[in-house]
Image (cartoon, rainbow, N blue to C red):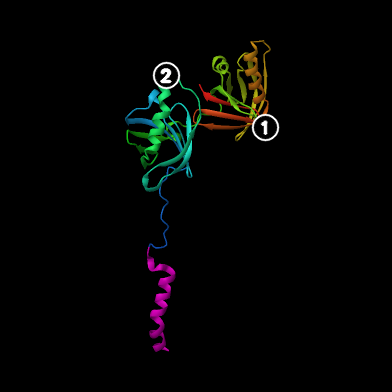
Amino acid sequence: MSANFVRFGPLLVLALCATAACGSDSGKSAEPAATPIGHTYVSTAVDGVAIPGGGPLTMTLENEHVTASAGCNSFSGAATLDDNKLKATGLAGTLMACPGERAGADEWLTTLLNSTPGWQLDGAEFTLHGTASTVHLLDKKVAQPDKSLTDTTWVVREIITAQARTSSRTIDEVKPTLSIAADGAVSGSGGCNRMMGKATIAGSEVTFQVGSTRMMCPPEVMEVENAVLKALDGKTTATIDADTLTLRNDNGNGLILHAQ
């Protein structure tokens, strides 16, 4: 019996090593490499040719897709990040006219993206090395933390309908506002009349009960105010991204507001 034990003993030891890996590190999984995919970045500094109008450059990188704006129009297209190079193709942009120096921001941006810039990621810091400019960016969640829904004065910038998102000179001039106190009390202005009421907050769902005074203003102002009141009538979904609040009502109306 002892001879059999000596003969098969090494095989038993080898089997145990195969099961337990004999204390080696081979069972450890490597940590995934850091990636800028799924993040939005905002420029903090530019070396070389500066952004006309001052920017900033805002860039969102999704899986094989990039969206960017340098202060005028927004451009988007396919993108890859292979070999630490940002290769953007098929770029298409909006067609808004921008005044002053900002009119040159689009050309600056497309020049940067078409140069297949190198990229570097260091924690929340993202750097693009173009042929004419090196752009230093910071994760937007770090650079511009989300504002609080309550105890913030929000100013309407755009109106959402089932057909479109609309901005106008009238909206910019009358500046409709919305404030929600910690206890849910609502105050603000629809652009003409004073608003008051309450909001019930449950996560991202905000249900409004809002009324207003009854003063009459010019038709274009009343049109804005009616759109604001429709958006604040009943159940909405609230989304906050840095200093921007988007409210989408179940009735198809909504608002895009910026923190004051």
Using residue 167 as the reference point, say whether residue 229 is left or right of it.
right
Residue 66 visible? The answer is no
Q: Residue at x 39, y 89 (%)?
A: 3
Which amino acid type is shown beneath numbered disc 2?
Gly
SS class of the residue under badge 2?
helix
Identify the residue at image location x=42%, y=31%: 57
Residue 12 found in image quarter = bottom left
Residue at the image point whose x is 41% and y is 27% from the top: 105
Give the residues drawn in magenta, as a range: 1-24
Which of the image's four quarters has the N terminus? bottom left
Position of 233 compared to 99: left or right? Answer: right
Residue denoted by label 2? 100
How far across and down, in percent of the image, does residue 209 sit? 68, 24
Identify which residue, 222 or 162, lies in the foreground.
162
x 50%, y 25%: residue: 96
Count all numbered tags in the image, as a single digit: 2
Comes first in the chain, label 2 or label 1: 2
State if disc 1 and disc 2 touch (CB < 8 Å). no
Q: Is residue 7 magenta?
A: yes
Kindly identify which residue carries mark 1: 250
Q: Nearer the viewer, mark 2 or mark 1?
A: 2
Near mark 1 (Cα within 10 A), the count class, few <14, some 14-19 or many ≥20, is: few
